[in-house]
């Protein structure tokens, strides 16, 4: 688009009487294109098939639950907070729900689970 404007400005037989009409039409088209684009983005953002699924992947949830049950059987030596986190996971709570209950973030919950896993590997190999 810019190239066309530059070429037009450099055209030696440019009719200066028609430039205001050309620029008005150009700006109008750009505004219409922008409005269409924004309408499509807005429509897509509210379309039910395009809304992202839960951050918790089903495979991760199943693996986390199985691992949490294994951990729960070996939690005697862990802190009350760690035990609560693992027991909530075995009960089917999502990371988001656990985070809300414990007053952390889902990433904080993920990190806490990682630390618990690491402790378990150190103890049980």
Image (cartoon, helix red, strand yellow):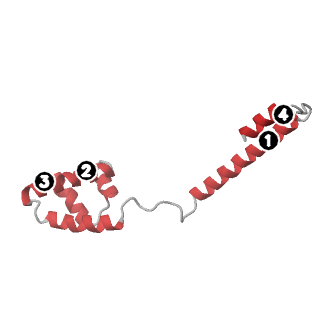
- Name which residue lies at 16% across and 57% down: 83
The reply to whether dot 4 and dot 3 touch (C-beta < 8 Å) is no
The reply to whether dot 3 and dot 1 touch (C-beta < 8 Å) is no
First of labels 2, 3 by sequence position? 2
Label annotation for residue 119:
3
Label annotation for residue 11:
4
First of labels 4, 1 by sequence position? 4
First of labels 4, 2 by sequence position? 4
Q: Which residue is mark 2?
A: 111
Give left or right: position of 33 versus 58.
right
CA gap between label 3 and label 1 equals 65 Å
Furthest residue toward front: 12
First of labels 2, 1 by sequence position? 1
CA gap between label 2 and label 3 equals 12 Å
Q: Which residue is mark 1?
A: 26
Q: Position of residue 121 (x, y in %)?
A: 12, 57
The residue carrying pointer 4 sits among few (fewer than 14), some (14 to 19) or many (20 or more) residues within 10 Å by Cα, namely few
The residue carrying pointer 3 sits among few (fewer than 14), some (14 to 19) or many (20 or more) residues within 10 Å by Cα, namely few
Secondary structure of the residue carrying tag 2 is helix
Q: Nearer the viewer, residue 125 or 117?
A: 125
Quadrant position of the C terminus in the picture: bottom left
Secondary structure of the residue carrying tag 4 is loop
CA gap between label 4 and label 1 equals 17 Å
């Amino acid at each position: 688009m810019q190239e066309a404007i530059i070429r037009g400005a450099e055209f030696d037989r440019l009719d200066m009487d028609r430039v205001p009409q050309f620029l008005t039409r150009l700006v109008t088209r750009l505004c219409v294109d922008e409005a269409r684009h924004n309408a499509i983005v807005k429509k897509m953002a509210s379309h039910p098939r395009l809304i992202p699924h839960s951050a918790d992947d089903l495979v991760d949830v199943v693996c986390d639950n199985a691992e949490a049950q294994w951990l729960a059987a070996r939690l005697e030596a862990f802190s009350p907070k760690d035990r609560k986190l693992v027991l909530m996971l075995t009960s089917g709570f999502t990371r988001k729900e656990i985070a809300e209950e414990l007053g952390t973030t889902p990433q904080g919950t993920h990190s806490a689970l990682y630390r618990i896993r690491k402790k378990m590997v150190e103890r049980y190999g």
